[in-house]
Image (cartoon, rainbow, N blue to C red):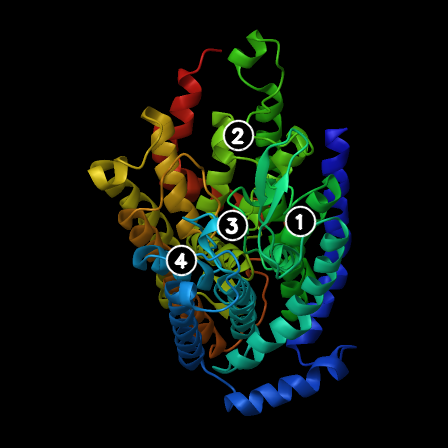
Protein backbone atom coordinates (compact mmCIF):
# COMPACT_ATOMS: atom_id res chain seq x y z
CA UNK A 1 0.00 0.00 0.00
CA UNK A 2 2.83 2.37 0.84
CA UNK A 3 4.50 1.73 -2.50
CA UNK A 4 1.24 2.50 -4.32
CA UNK A 5 0.90 5.83 -2.47
CA UNK A 6 4.43 6.84 -3.41
CA UNK A 7 3.99 5.78 -7.04
CA UNK A 8 0.69 7.65 -7.36
CA UNK A 9 2.25 10.85 -6.02
CA UNK A 10 5.17 10.63 -8.44
CA UNK A 11 2.82 9.99 -11.38
CA UNK A 12 0.81 13.13 -10.50
CA UNK A 13 4.01 15.16 -10.44
CA UNK A 14 5.09 13.84 -13.84
CA UNK A 15 1.70 14.60 -15.40
CA UNK A 16 2.00 18.25 -14.30
CA UNK A 17 5.57 18.82 -15.52
CA UNK A 18 4.77 19.55 -19.17
CA UNK A 19 1.75 21.90 -18.80
CA UNK A 20 3.31 23.89 -15.95
CA UNK A 21 6.69 24.09 -17.70
CA UNK A 22 5.03 25.31 -20.90
CA UNK A 23 3.13 27.98 -18.96
CA UNK A 24 6.33 29.17 -17.29
CA UNK A 25 7.98 29.68 -20.68
CA UNK A 26 5.07 31.90 -21.71
CA UNK A 27 5.31 33.92 -18.50
CA UNK A 28 9.01 34.73 -18.86
CA UNK A 29 8.84 35.03 -22.63
CA UNK A 30 6.30 37.87 -22.25
CA UNK A 31 3.74 35.81 -24.19
CA UNK A 32 0.04 36.28 -23.68
CA UNK A 33 -1.66 34.26 -20.94
CA UNK A 34 -5.14 34.32 -19.44
CA UNK A 35 -3.74 36.14 -16.36
CA UNK A 36 -2.68 39.23 -18.34
CA UNK A 37 -5.99 41.00 -17.80
CA UNK A 38 -5.96 40.24 -14.08
CA UNK A 39 -2.40 41.15 -13.17
CA UNK A 40 -1.22 43.29 -16.10
CA UNK A 41 -2.59 46.66 -14.87
CA UNK A 42 -1.30 46.10 -11.34
CA UNK A 43 2.14 45.12 -12.62
CA UNK A 44 2.41 48.25 -14.78
CA UNK A 45 1.37 50.42 -11.83
CA UNK A 46 3.98 48.71 -9.66
CA UNK A 47 6.68 49.31 -12.26
CA UNK A 48 5.84 53.02 -12.35
CA UNK A 49 5.97 53.25 -8.56
CA UNK A 50 9.33 51.46 -8.52
CA UNK A 51 10.71 53.55 -11.37
CA UNK A 52 11.31 50.42 -13.46
CA UNK A 53 11.21 50.54 -17.23
CA UNK A 54 9.69 47.23 -18.27
CA UNK A 55 11.71 46.85 -21.47
CA UNK A 56 15.05 47.91 -19.99
CA UNK A 57 17.68 45.22 -20.50
CA UNK A 58 20.29 44.34 -17.89
CA UNK A 59 23.74 42.93 -18.41
CA UNK A 60 24.96 40.33 -15.93
CA UNK A 61 26.65 42.86 -13.64
CA UNK A 62 23.57 45.07 -13.46
CA UNK A 63 21.38 41.99 -12.90
CA UNK A 64 23.60 40.87 -10.01
CA UNK A 65 23.56 44.38 -8.56
CA UNK A 66 19.76 44.47 -8.65
CA UNK A 67 19.54 41.12 -6.86
CA UNK A 68 22.02 42.07 -4.13
CA UNK A 69 20.58 45.56 -3.54
CA UNK A 70 16.95 44.45 -3.37
CA UNK A 71 17.75 41.46 -1.15
CA UNK A 72 19.83 43.59 1.22
CA UNK A 73 17.02 46.11 1.67
CA UNK A 74 14.48 43.34 2.26
CA UNK A 75 16.76 41.57 4.75
CA UNK A 76 17.18 44.80 6.69
CA UNK A 77 13.38 45.18 6.80
CA UNK A 78 12.97 41.61 8.08
CA UNK A 79 15.59 42.19 10.78
CA UNK A 80 13.89 45.37 12.02
CA UNK A 81 10.45 43.75 12.16
CA UNK A 82 11.81 40.85 14.23
CA UNK A 83 13.72 43.13 16.59
CA UNK A 84 10.70 45.39 17.16
CA UNK A 85 7.82 42.91 17.00
CA UNK A 86 6.95 43.33 20.68
CA UNK A 87 6.04 46.98 20.07
CA UNK A 88 4.32 46.47 16.72
CA UNK A 89 0.65 45.61 16.02
CA UNK A 90 -0.84 42.18 15.20
CA UNK A 91 0.61 40.58 18.30
CA UNK A 92 -2.42 39.03 20.07
CA UNK A 93 -0.30 36.64 22.15
CA UNK A 94 2.06 39.37 23.43
CA UNK A 95 5.30 37.89 22.08
CA UNK A 96 8.43 39.94 22.81
CA UNK A 97 11.25 41.16 20.58
CA UNK A 98 13.63 38.63 19.06
CA UNK A 99 17.30 38.77 20.13
CA UNK A 100 19.88 40.34 17.82
CA UNK A 101 21.76 37.16 16.82
CA UNK A 102 18.58 35.15 16.30
CA UNK A 103 16.98 38.00 14.32
CA UNK A 104 20.06 38.10 12.06
CA UNK A 105 19.88 34.34 11.57
CA UNK A 106 16.14 34.43 10.81
CA UNK A 107 16.39 37.39 8.40
CA UNK A 108 19.29 35.74 6.56
CA UNK A 109 17.39 32.47 6.52
CA UNK A 110 14.20 33.73 4.92
CA UNK A 111 15.78 36.16 2.45
CA UNK A 112 17.93 33.30 1.09
CA UNK A 113 15.00 30.87 0.69
CA UNK A 114 16.54 28.67 3.42
CA UNK A 115 13.90 29.09 6.14
CA UNK A 116 16.08 27.57 8.84
CA UNK A 117 14.48 28.24 12.24
CA UNK A 118 16.28 28.41 15.57
CA UNK A 119 12.94 29.34 17.19
CA UNK A 120 9.46 27.82 17.46
CA UNK A 121 7.05 29.93 15.46
CA UNK A 122 4.08 29.51 17.77
CA UNK A 123 5.87 31.21 20.66
CA UNK A 124 8.64 33.14 18.90
CA UNK A 125 6.85 35.35 16.38
CA UNK A 126 3.95 37.79 16.33
CA UNK A 127 1.40 37.63 13.52
CA UNK A 128 2.99 40.72 11.91
CA UNK A 129 6.36 38.98 11.93
CA UNK A 130 4.80 35.86 10.44
CA UNK A 131 3.39 38.03 7.64
CA UNK A 132 6.21 40.51 6.94
CA UNK A 133 9.32 38.63 8.06
CA UNK A 134 8.26 35.11 7.06
CA UNK A 135 5.48 34.89 4.46
CA UNK A 136 6.55 37.98 2.45
CA UNK A 137 10.15 36.80 1.84
CA UNK A 138 8.82 33.34 1.01
CA UNK A 139 7.44 34.94 -2.14
CA UNK A 140 10.39 37.21 -2.93
CA UNK A 141 13.18 34.69 -2.23
CA UNK A 142 11.51 32.03 -4.39
CA UNK A 143 10.93 34.60 -7.13
CA UNK A 144 14.59 35.66 -6.93
CA UNK A 145 15.66 32.06 -7.54
CA UNK A 146 13.32 31.81 -10.51
CA UNK A 147 14.60 35.08 -11.97
CA UNK A 148 18.18 33.85 -11.57
CA UNK A 149 17.46 30.63 -13.48
CA UNK A 150 15.67 32.42 -16.30
CA UNK A 151 18.49 34.95 -16.60
CA UNK A 152 21.06 32.13 -16.79
CA UNK A 153 19.12 30.39 -19.55
CA UNK A 154 18.89 33.66 -21.49
CA UNK A 155 22.67 33.89 -21.25
CA UNK A 156 23.07 30.38 -22.65
CA UNK A 157 21.01 31.10 -25.76
CA UNK A 158 21.62 34.87 -26.06
CA UNK A 159 23.77 36.75 -28.53
CA UNK A 160 24.60 39.72 -26.29
CA UNK A 161 25.01 40.50 -22.59
CA UNK A 162 21.26 40.89 -22.02
CA UNK A 163 19.84 38.74 -19.23
CA UNK A 164 16.48 40.53 -19.06
CA UNK A 165 15.20 42.77 -16.29
CA UNK A 166 15.44 41.42 -12.75
CA UNK A 167 12.58 43.49 -11.37
CA UNK A 168 10.23 42.41 -14.15
CA UNK A 169 11.23 38.77 -13.71
CA UNK A 170 10.72 39.07 -9.94
CA UNK A 171 7.28 40.64 -10.22
CA UNK A 172 6.04 38.28 -12.93
CA UNK A 173 7.24 35.26 -10.92
CA UNK A 174 5.14 36.41 -7.98
CA UNK A 175 2.02 37.58 -9.81
CA UNK A 176 1.82 34.96 -12.56
CA UNK A 177 3.07 31.87 -10.70
CA UNK A 178 3.37 32.05 -6.92
CA UNK A 179 0.29 34.10 -6.04
CA UNK A 180 -2.24 32.12 -8.15
CA UNK A 181 -0.85 28.75 -7.10
CA UNK A 182 -0.61 29.71 -3.43
CA UNK A 183 -4.16 31.07 -3.41
CA UNK A 184 -5.59 27.83 -4.80
CA UNK A 185 -3.50 25.63 -2.51
CA UNK A 186 -4.38 27.72 0.56
CA UNK A 187 -8.10 27.37 -0.16
CA UNK A 188 -7.74 23.60 -0.35
CA UNK A 189 -5.66 23.41 2.84
CA UNK A 190 -8.20 25.47 4.79
CA UNK A 191 -10.88 23.15 3.44
CA UNK A 192 -8.89 20.25 4.91
CA UNK A 193 -8.88 21.87 8.36
CA UNK A 194 -5.77 24.06 8.52
CA UNK A 195 -6.51 27.28 10.50
CA UNK A 196 -6.49 30.71 8.85
CA UNK A 197 -7.36 33.44 11.35
CA UNK A 198 -6.06 36.66 12.91
CA UNK A 199 -7.36 35.55 16.32
CA UNK A 200 -4.82 34.60 18.96
CA UNK A 201 -4.36 31.42 20.97
CA UNK A 202 -7.42 29.94 22.68
CA UNK A 203 -7.63 28.18 26.06
CA UNK A 204 -9.68 24.98 26.05
CA UNK A 205 -10.58 22.12 28.37
CA UNK A 206 -9.65 18.71 26.99
CA UNK A 207 -11.77 15.55 27.23
CA UNK A 208 -9.68 14.54 30.25
CA UNK A 209 -10.54 17.83 31.96
CA UNK A 210 -7.05 19.35 31.57
CA UNK A 211 -6.43 22.94 30.49
CA UNK A 212 -4.63 23.49 27.20
CA UNK A 213 -3.63 26.52 25.14
CA UNK A 214 -4.06 26.00 21.38
CA UNK A 215 -2.12 28.27 19.04
CA UNK A 216 -3.85 29.50 15.90
CA UNK A 217 -2.97 31.94 13.16
CA UNK A 218 -2.59 32.54 9.42
CA UNK A 219 -1.34 29.02 8.88
CA UNK A 220 -3.13 28.09 5.63
CA UNK A 221 -1.61 30.94 3.62
CA UNK A 222 1.87 30.29 5.02
CA UNK A 223 1.67 26.56 4.27
CA UNK A 224 0.74 27.23 0.65
CA UNK A 225 3.70 29.45 -0.31
CA UNK A 226 5.92 27.46 2.05
CA UNK A 227 5.64 24.43 -0.23
CA UNK A 228 4.90 26.06 -3.60
CA UNK A 229 7.97 28.27 -3.13
CA UNK A 230 10.15 25.44 -1.69
CA UNK A 231 10.60 27.52 1.45
CA UNK A 232 9.99 25.22 4.38
CA UNK A 233 9.64 27.41 7.47
CA UNK A 234 6.85 26.25 9.77
CA UNK A 235 4.31 28.15 11.86
CA UNK A 236 4.92 25.52 14.54
CA UNK A 237 8.17 24.09 15.83
CA UNK A 238 7.22 20.59 14.65
CA UNK A 239 6.60 21.94 11.14
CA UNK A 240 4.57 19.71 8.79
CA UNK A 241 4.32 17.00 11.46
CA UNK A 242 1.88 19.27 13.35
CA UNK A 243 -1.80 18.49 12.66
CA UNK A 244 -2.55 22.19 12.10
CA UNK A 245 0.04 22.31 9.30
CA UNK A 246 -0.52 18.87 7.81
CA UNK A 247 -3.70 17.25 9.15
CA UNK A 248 -4.46 14.48 6.63
CA UNK A 249 -2.74 12.11 4.18
CA UNK A 250 -4.34 14.20 1.42
CA UNK A 251 -2.70 17.44 2.62
CA UNK A 252 0.54 15.49 2.88
CA UNK A 253 0.27 14.52 -0.80
CA UNK A 254 -0.54 18.12 -1.77
CA UNK A 255 2.52 19.35 0.14
CA UNK A 256 4.74 16.86 -1.69
CA UNK A 257 3.31 17.69 -5.12
CA UNK A 258 3.70 21.43 -4.44
CA UNK A 259 7.34 21.01 -3.43
CA UNK A 260 8.24 19.14 -6.62
CA UNK A 261 5.93 20.96 -9.04
CA UNK A 262 7.99 24.00 -10.01
CA UNK A 263 11.53 22.55 -9.68
CA UNK A 264 10.66 19.67 -12.04
CA UNK A 265 8.69 21.89 -14.42
CA UNK A 266 11.56 24.37 -14.61
CA UNK A 267 13.83 21.66 -16.03
CA UNK A 268 11.27 21.01 -18.78
CA UNK A 269 10.94 24.77 -19.34
CA UNK A 270 14.72 24.89 -19.75
CA UNK A 271 14.48 22.48 -22.67
CA UNK A 272 11.79 24.63 -24.31
CA UNK A 273 13.69 27.89 -23.81
CA UNK A 274 16.88 26.56 -25.42
CA UNK A 275 14.77 24.95 -28.20
CA UNK A 276 16.20 21.54 -27.41
CA UNK A 277 13.71 19.35 -25.57
CA UNK A 278 16.10 16.39 -25.65
CA UNK A 279 18.64 18.42 -23.67
CA UNK A 280 16.00 19.29 -21.08
CA UNK A 281 14.94 15.68 -20.74
CA UNK A 282 18.58 14.58 -20.43
CA UNK A 283 19.08 16.84 -17.42
CA UNK A 284 15.67 15.79 -16.05
CA UNK A 285 16.59 12.11 -16.40
CA UNK A 286 19.90 12.55 -14.59
CA UNK A 287 18.19 14.31 -11.69
CA UNK A 288 15.28 11.85 -11.70
CA UNK A 289 17.48 8.76 -11.52
CA UNK A 290 19.47 10.14 -8.59
CA UNK A 291 16.18 11.02 -6.88
CA UNK A 292 14.82 7.48 -7.34
CA UNK A 293 18.02 5.94 -5.95
CA UNK A 294 17.83 8.19 -2.89
CA UNK A 295 14.15 7.40 -2.40
CA UNK A 296 14.82 3.66 -2.65
CA UNK A 297 17.60 3.82 -0.04
CA UNK A 298 15.52 5.61 2.60
CA UNK A 299 12.40 3.56 1.75
CA UNK A 300 14.21 0.25 2.27
CA UNK A 301 16.19 1.46 5.30
CA UNK A 302 13.12 2.67 7.18
CA UNK A 303 11.08 -0.44 6.38
CA UNK A 304 13.93 -2.70 7.49
CA UNK A 305 14.27 -0.77 10.74
CA UNK A 306 16.97 -1.71 13.23
CA UNK A 307 17.89 -4.92 15.00
CA UNK A 308 16.83 -3.67 18.44
CA UNK A 309 13.30 -2.98 17.24
CA UNK A 310 13.12 -6.32 15.42
CA UNK A 311 14.11 -8.07 18.64
CA UNK A 312 11.23 -6.32 20.40
CA UNK A 313 8.81 -7.50 17.72
CA UNK A 314 8.51 -4.09 16.03
CA UNK A 315 9.21 -4.27 12.31
CA UNK A 316 10.06 -1.03 10.54
CA UNK A 317 11.25 2.24 12.06
CA UNK A 318 8.28 4.35 13.18
CA UNK A 319 10.27 6.41 15.68
CA UNK A 320 9.76 10.12 15.04
CA UNK A 321 7.04 9.52 12.46
CA UNK A 322 3.33 10.37 12.48
CA UNK A 323 1.00 7.37 12.42
CA UNK A 324 -1.29 9.13 9.94
CA UNK A 325 1.55 9.17 7.39
CA UNK A 326 3.43 5.97 8.14
CA UNK A 327 6.84 4.95 6.87
CA UNK A 328 6.20 5.32 3.14
CA UNK A 329 4.85 8.87 3.17
CA UNK A 330 7.50 9.93 5.68
CA UNK A 331 10.27 8.48 3.49
CA UNK A 332 8.88 10.18 0.37
CA UNK A 333 8.44 13.51 2.18
CA UNK A 334 12.01 13.39 3.48
CA UNK A 335 13.41 12.64 0.03
CA UNK A 336 11.34 15.36 -1.64
CA UNK A 337 11.93 18.11 0.92
CA UNK A 338 15.72 17.78 0.69
CA UNK A 339 15.76 17.15 -3.08
CA UNK A 340 13.72 20.32 -3.67
CA UNK A 341 15.62 22.15 -0.89
CA UNK A 342 12.35 22.97 0.83
CA UNK A 343 13.16 22.07 4.42
CA UNK A 344 9.62 21.24 5.48
CA UNK A 345 9.50 18.05 7.55
CA UNK A 346 6.66 15.69 8.46
CA UNK A 347 8.92 13.48 10.59
CA UNK A 348 12.00 14.01 12.72
CA UNK A 349 15.08 13.34 10.60
CA UNK A 350 17.16 12.61 13.69
CA UNK A 351 15.01 9.52 14.24
CA UNK A 352 15.75 8.07 10.81
CA UNK A 353 17.92 4.96 10.64
CA UNK A 354 21.59 5.83 10.10
CA UNK A 355 21.46 4.76 6.44
CA UNK A 356 18.15 6.56 6.00
CA UNK A 357 19.63 9.78 7.39
CA UNK A 358 22.33 9.74 4.70
CA UNK A 359 19.67 10.48 2.06
CA UNK A 360 18.63 13.98 3.19
CA UNK A 361 22.25 14.88 3.89
CA UNK A 362 23.48 13.56 0.53
CA UNK A 363 20.77 15.38 -1.42
CA UNK A 364 21.63 18.67 0.25
CA UNK A 365 25.34 18.04 -0.29
CA UNK A 366 24.77 17.43 -4.01
CA UNK A 367 22.23 20.30 -4.11
CA UNK A 368 21.16 19.57 -7.68
CA UNK A 369 18.51 16.83 -7.51
CA UNK A 370 15.90 19.21 -8.98
CA UNK A 371 16.69 21.57 -6.10
CA UNK A 372 14.88 24.72 -5.03
CA UNK A 373 13.53 27.43 -7.29
CA UNK A 374 16.10 27.94 -10.03
CA UNK A 375 19.15 27.05 -7.97
CA UNK A 376 18.79 23.29 -8.39
CA UNK A 377 18.64 23.55 -12.18
CA UNK A 378 21.64 25.88 -12.24
CA UNK A 379 23.72 23.58 -10.02
CA UNK A 380 22.84 20.75 -12.39
CA UNK A 381 23.94 22.86 -15.35
CA UNK A 382 27.21 23.71 -13.59
CA UNK A 383 27.95 20.00 -13.30
CA UNK A 384 26.94 19.64 -16.95
CA UNK A 385 29.43 22.35 -17.97
CA UNK A 386 32.11 20.58 -15.93
CA UNK A 387 31.20 17.25 -17.57
CA UNK A 388 31.46 18.81 -21.03
CA UNK A 389 34.87 20.22 -20.15
CA UNK A 390 36.17 16.89 -18.83
CA UNK A 391 34.84 15.00 -21.87
CA UNK A 392 36.42 17.59 -24.17
CA UNK A 393 39.79 17.07 -22.53
CA UNK A 394 39.45 13.30 -22.95
CA UNK A 395 38.86 13.51 -26.71
CA UNK A 396 41.17 16.46 -27.33
CA UNK A 397 38.47 18.87 -28.50
CA UNK A 398 37.41 22.29 -27.28
CA UNK A 399 34.29 21.62 -25.21
CA UNK A 400 31.01 23.17 -26.36
CA UNK A 401 27.56 23.46 -24.85
CA UNK A 402 24.59 24.62 -26.92
CA UNK A 403 27.03 25.67 -29.63
CA UNK A 404 29.14 27.88 -27.36
CA UNK A 405 32.71 27.08 -26.37
CA UNK A 406 33.37 26.32 -22.71
CA UNK A 407 36.73 27.92 -21.94
CA UNK A 408 38.89 28.61 -18.91
CA UNK A 409 36.83 31.53 -17.58
CA UNK A 410 33.60 29.52 -17.44
CA UNK A 411 35.27 26.49 -15.86
CA UNK A 412 36.93 28.62 -13.18
CA UNK A 413 33.64 30.32 -12.30
CA UNK A 414 31.85 26.95 -12.24
CA UNK A 415 34.58 25.59 -9.96
CA UNK A 416 34.12 28.53 -7.57
CA UNK A 417 30.36 27.97 -7.44
CA UNK A 418 30.79 24.23 -6.87
CA UNK A 419 33.69 24.38 -4.38
CA UNK A 420 32.25 27.08 -2.13
CA UNK A 421 29.45 24.67 -1.21
CA UNK A 422 31.58 21.95 0.48
CA UNK A 423 33.89 24.57 1.98
CA UNK A 424 31.11 26.37 3.88
CA UNK A 425 29.80 23.01 5.10
CA UNK A 426 32.96 21.21 6.18
CA UNK A 427 34.98 24.16 7.56
CA UNK A 428 32.25 25.42 9.97
CA UNK A 429 31.46 21.83 11.00
CA UNK A 430 35.11 21.28 11.90
CA UNK A 431 35.20 24.58 13.79
CA UNK A 432 32.04 23.70 15.72
CA UNK A 433 33.37 20.28 16.71
CA UNK A 434 36.69 21.80 17.80
CA UNK A 435 35.24 24.46 20.10
CA UNK A 436 33.18 24.42 23.26
CA UNK A 437 30.75 26.93 21.71
CA UNK A 438 29.87 24.33 19.10
CA UNK A 439 29.95 21.10 21.12
CA UNK A 440 28.02 22.47 24.09
CA UNK A 441 24.83 22.54 21.98
CA UNK A 442 25.03 18.87 21.00
CA UNK A 443 22.55 16.68 22.87
CA UNK A 444 23.96 13.35 21.68
CA UNK A 445 27.58 12.29 21.86
CA UNK A 446 29.66 10.32 19.40
CA UNK A 447 28.86 9.83 15.74
CA UNK A 448 25.24 10.94 16.09
CA UNK A 449 26.32 14.25 17.57
CA UNK A 450 28.68 14.79 14.66
CA UNK A 451 25.76 14.14 12.30
CA UNK A 452 23.69 16.80 14.08
CA UNK A 453 26.30 19.49 13.44
CA UNK A 454 27.10 18.31 9.91
CA UNK A 455 23.40 18.31 9.01
CA UNK A 456 22.89 21.84 10.38
CA UNK A 457 25.63 23.44 8.28
CA UNK A 458 24.70 21.34 5.24
CA UNK A 459 21.12 22.56 5.54
CA UNK A 460 22.28 26.16 5.76
CA UNK A 461 24.72 25.93 2.85
CA UNK A 462 22.14 24.23 0.60
CA UNK A 463 19.53 26.84 1.58
CA UNK A 464 17.32 23.96 2.66
CA UNK A 465 16.37 24.74 6.24
CA UNK A 466 15.40 21.31 7.53
CA UNK A 467 16.91 20.32 10.88
CA UNK A 468 18.29 17.04 12.20
CA UNK A 469 16.98 18.02 15.64
CA UNK A 470 18.87 17.28 18.81
CA UNK A 471 21.05 20.37 18.30
CA UNK A 472 20.37 23.56 20.24
CA UNK A 473 20.94 26.03 17.39
CA UNK A 474 19.69 29.05 19.34
CA UNK A 475 23.10 30.21 20.51
CA UNK A 476 25.18 33.12 19.26
CA UNK A 477 27.67 30.68 17.73
CA UNK A 478 25.13 28.81 15.63
CA UNK A 479 22.84 31.77 14.91
CA UNK A 480 25.72 33.82 13.49
CA UNK A 481 27.62 30.88 12.00
CA UNK A 482 24.70 29.31 10.16
CA UNK A 483 23.45 32.79 9.19
CA UNK A 484 26.73 33.56 7.44
CA UNK A 485 26.78 30.13 5.79
CA UNK A 486 23.29 30.73 4.38
CA UNK A 487 24.33 34.10 2.92
CA UNK A 488 27.56 32.74 1.41
CA UNK A 489 25.78 29.67 0.04
CA UNK A 490 23.21 31.85 -1.71
CA UNK A 491 25.01 34.88 -3.04
CA UNK A 492 28.50 33.68 -3.97
CA UNK A 493 26.88 31.09 -6.22
CA UNK A 494 24.50 33.69 -7.68
CA UNK A 495 27.39 35.98 -8.64
CA UNK A 496 29.41 33.13 -10.20
CA UNK A 497 26.42 31.74 -12.10
CA UNK A 498 25.42 35.08 -13.61
CA UNK A 499 29.05 35.80 -14.51
CA UNK A 500 29.06 32.54 -16.48
CA UNK A 501 25.78 33.55 -18.15
CA UNK A 502 27.21 36.93 -19.08
CA UNK A 503 30.34 35.35 -20.50
CA UNK A 504 28.44 32.80 -22.60
CA UNK A 505 25.91 35.36 -23.79
CA UNK A 506 28.49 37.27 -25.87
CA UNK A 507 30.06 34.19 -27.47
CA UNK A 508 29.28 33.34 -31.05
CA UNK A 509 27.61 30.04 -31.83
CA UNK A 510 29.89 27.36 -33.26
CA UNK A 511 28.33 25.22 -36.04
CA UNK A 512 27.60 21.61 -35.11
CA UNK A 513 29.97 19.12 -36.74
CA UNK A 514 30.54 15.38 -36.60
CA UNK A 515 33.09 16.00 -33.84
CA UNK A 516 30.67 17.92 -31.61
CA UNK A 517 30.01 16.25 -28.27
CA UNK A 518 26.26 15.77 -28.03
CA UNK A 519 24.99 16.50 -24.54
CA UNK A 520 21.41 15.29 -25.04
CA UNK A 521 22.10 11.56 -25.38
CA UNK A 522 21.65 8.72 -22.86
CA UNK A 523 25.44 8.26 -22.85
CA UNK A 524 26.07 11.84 -21.74
CA UNK A 525 23.27 11.57 -19.17
CA UNK A 526 25.17 8.65 -17.66
CA UNK A 527 28.41 10.67 -17.70
CA UNK A 528 26.66 13.58 -15.97
CA UNK A 529 25.34 11.29 -13.23
CA UNK A 530 28.79 9.78 -12.76
CA UNK A 531 30.48 13.20 -12.49
CA UNK A 532 27.90 14.40 -9.95
CA UNK A 533 28.21 11.31 -7.77
CA UNK A 534 31.99 10.99 -8.00
CA UNK A 535 32.61 14.63 -7.08
CA UNK A 536 30.02 14.42 -4.31
CA UNK A 537 31.46 11.17 -2.96
CA UNK A 538 35.06 12.38 -3.00
CA UNK A 539 34.10 15.60 -1.25
CA UNK A 540 31.71 14.45 1.45
CA UNK A 541 32.31 10.73 1.99
CA UNK A 542 34.93 11.23 4.77
CA UNK A 543 32.48 13.37 6.77
CA UNK A 544 29.62 10.92 6.21
CA UNK A 545 31.92 8.04 7.18
CA UNK A 546 32.51 9.67 10.58
CA UNK A 547 28.79 10.34 11.07
CA UNK A 548 25.88 8.19 9.83
CA UNK A 549 28.01 5.46 8.23
CA UNK A 550 30.02 4.92 11.43
CA UNK A 551 26.78 4.93 13.43
CA UNK A 552 25.33 2.26 11.15
CA UNK A 553 28.41 0.06 11.45
CA UNK A 554 28.41 0.42 15.24
CA UNK A 555 24.81 -0.82 15.57
CA UNK A 556 24.16 -4.51 16.29
CA UNK A 557 22.99 -6.33 13.18
User: Residue 520's spot in the image, x, y percent?
Assistant: 62, 56
The residue mark sitting in front, 3 or 1, is 3
Task: Please indicate whether residue 94 sits to the left or right of residue 44 in the image.
Answer: left
Q: Secondary structure at mark 4?
A: loop
Of the numbered discs 1 and 2, the one sitting upstream in the chain is: 1
Q: Secondary structure at mark 2?
A: helix
- Residue under label 1: 255
Q: Secondary structure at mark 3?
A: helix
Of the numbered discs 1 and 4, the one sitting upstream in the chain is: 4
Kindly report the distance in space between the C-alpha atoms of the residues bearing marks 1 and 4. 31 Å
State the residue in front, 335 or 185.
185
The residue mark sitting in front, 1 or 2, is 1
Kindly report the distance in space between the C-alpha atoms of the residues bearing marks 3 and 1. 20 Å
- Residue under label 4: 96
Of the numbered discs 3 and 2, the one sitting upstream in the chain is: 3
Kindly report the distance in space between the C-alpha atoms of the residues bearing marks 4 and 3. 12 Å
Of the numbered discs 4 and 3, the one sitting upstream in the chain is: 4
Which label is found at residue 356? 2
Q: Are marks 4 and 3 in contact (CB under 8 Å)?
A: no
Amino acid sequence: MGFIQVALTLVIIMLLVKPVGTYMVKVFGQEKTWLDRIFGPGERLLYRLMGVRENEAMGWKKYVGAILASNFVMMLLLYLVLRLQGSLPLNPDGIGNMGAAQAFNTAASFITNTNWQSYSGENGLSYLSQLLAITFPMFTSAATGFALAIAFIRGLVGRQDNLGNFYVDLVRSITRIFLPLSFLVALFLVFQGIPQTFQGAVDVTTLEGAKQTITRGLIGSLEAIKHVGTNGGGWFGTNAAHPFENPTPLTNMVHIVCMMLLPTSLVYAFGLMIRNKKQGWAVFTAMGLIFLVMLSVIFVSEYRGVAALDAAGVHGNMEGKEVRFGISESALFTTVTTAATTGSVNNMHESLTPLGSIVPMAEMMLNNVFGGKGVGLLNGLLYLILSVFICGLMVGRTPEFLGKKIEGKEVKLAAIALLIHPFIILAPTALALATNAGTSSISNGGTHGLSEVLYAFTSGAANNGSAFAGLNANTDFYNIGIGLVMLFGRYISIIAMLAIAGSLAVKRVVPVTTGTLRTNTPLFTGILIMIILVIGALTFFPALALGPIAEHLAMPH
